């Protein structure tokens, strides 16, 4: 992933040495080579036919459980290799959102192209700004239209609606185990709530109250002999 590694001497007066290297762009853009089964393009009819042709009575006759499982597994993997194609496994975060369509995808690619042109001095700032504003408006409209369709079809398609709601929630609802001041580990909900209450109470009362009083006293020292400012009717 890196190349052209060179030592550039010590860093100051310490014995650590600075290292200069170059990050390879090809390695940084490498994609995952993990594959998974693509059941959408699978031929289940041929799969059932291949497994149905196997004489299971003769193939499994007189064998134990482990040997029978290995024979069955061998036939199953052979049929799977012929009938179910594979595809590259993508990350969960790389999935295309439901509001993304072909036209909007082209708009976003055009915005990236305009950004690169603006960085290189080939596109004016006004043109790039108009492209960004147009793409943002298209994204807002697409998101609003998707949410409107989900709300309208909630009676017939509840699964898509609740999947969209769960994707919007990014908060962590569960709190892990906590340690008490005595060193005991707390795992139950009520006990964890009591520990958190004690911590917040100690922070916002004992530690902050004295500091707040000192700051207030420090601010008020210069105003002991000063007259209060006049307040007009409009200020009241």
Image (spheres, rainbow, N blue to C red):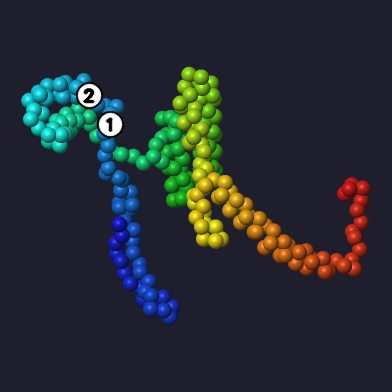
Which of the pair 76/24 is nearer the observer?
A: 76
Which of the pair 9/219 is nearer the observer?
A: 219
Q: Is residue 127 visible?
A: no
Instruction: Confirm or deny contact between disc 1 and disc 2 (CB under 8 A).
Output: no
Up the image or down, 60 lies above or below 116; here it is above
Residue found farthest to the bottom: 13
Location of mark 2 (residue) = 43
Label 1, label 2: how far apart the Cα atoms are: 10 Å
128 displayed left or right of 51? right
Residue visible at 52% across and 47% down in the picture: 188
Residue visible at 29% across and 27% down in the picture: 40
Q: What is the x, y in percent for residue 159?
A: 46, 26
The mark that comes first in sequence, 1 or 2, is 1
Disc 2 on helix, strand or loop? loop
Residue visible at 55% across and 50% down in the picture: 192
User: Can you tell which mark lies on residue 198?
Assistant: none
Which of the pair 155/3 is nearer the observer?
A: 155
210 displayed left or right of 30? right
Which of the pair 169/120 is nearer the observer?
A: 169
Q: What is the x, y in percent for residue 175?
A: 51, 48
Q: What is the x, y in percent for residue 104?
A: 45, 32
Q: Is residue 28 visible?
A: yes
Tell how many labels: 2
Location of mark 1 (residue) = 38
Quarter placement of the N terminus: bottom left
107 displayed left or right of 203? left
Residue visible at 24% across and 26% down in the picture: 42
């Amino acid at each position: 992933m890196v190349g052209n590694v060179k030592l550039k001497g010590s860093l100051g007066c310490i014995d650590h040495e600075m290292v200069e290297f170059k990050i390879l762009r090809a390695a940084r853009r490498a994609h995952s080579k993990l594959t998974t089964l693509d059941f959408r393009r699978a031929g289940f009819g041929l799969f059932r036919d291949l497994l149905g042709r196997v004489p299971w009575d003769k193939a499994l006759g007189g064998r134990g459980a482990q040997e029978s499982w290995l024979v069955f597994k061998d036939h199953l993997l052979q049929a799977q290799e012929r009938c179910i194609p594979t595809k590259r496994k993508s990350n969960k975060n790389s999935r295309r959102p439901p509001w993304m369509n072909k036209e909007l995808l082209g708009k976003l690619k055009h915005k990236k192209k305009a950004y690169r042109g603006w960085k290189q001095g080939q596109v004016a700032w006004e043109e790039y700004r108009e492209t960004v504003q147009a793409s943002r408006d298209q994204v807002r409209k697409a998101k609003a239209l998707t949410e409107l369709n989900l709300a309208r079809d909630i009676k017939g398609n509840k699964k898509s609606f609740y999947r969209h709601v769960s994707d919007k929630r990014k908060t962590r609802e569960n709190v892990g185990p906590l340690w008490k001041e005595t060193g005991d580990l707390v795992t139950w909900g009520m006990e964890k709530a009591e520990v958190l209450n004690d911590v917040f109470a100690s922070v916002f009362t004992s530690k902050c109250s004295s500091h707040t009083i000192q700051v207030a006293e420090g601010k008020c020292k210069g105003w002991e002999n000063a007259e209060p400012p006049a307040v007009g009717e409009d200020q009241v």
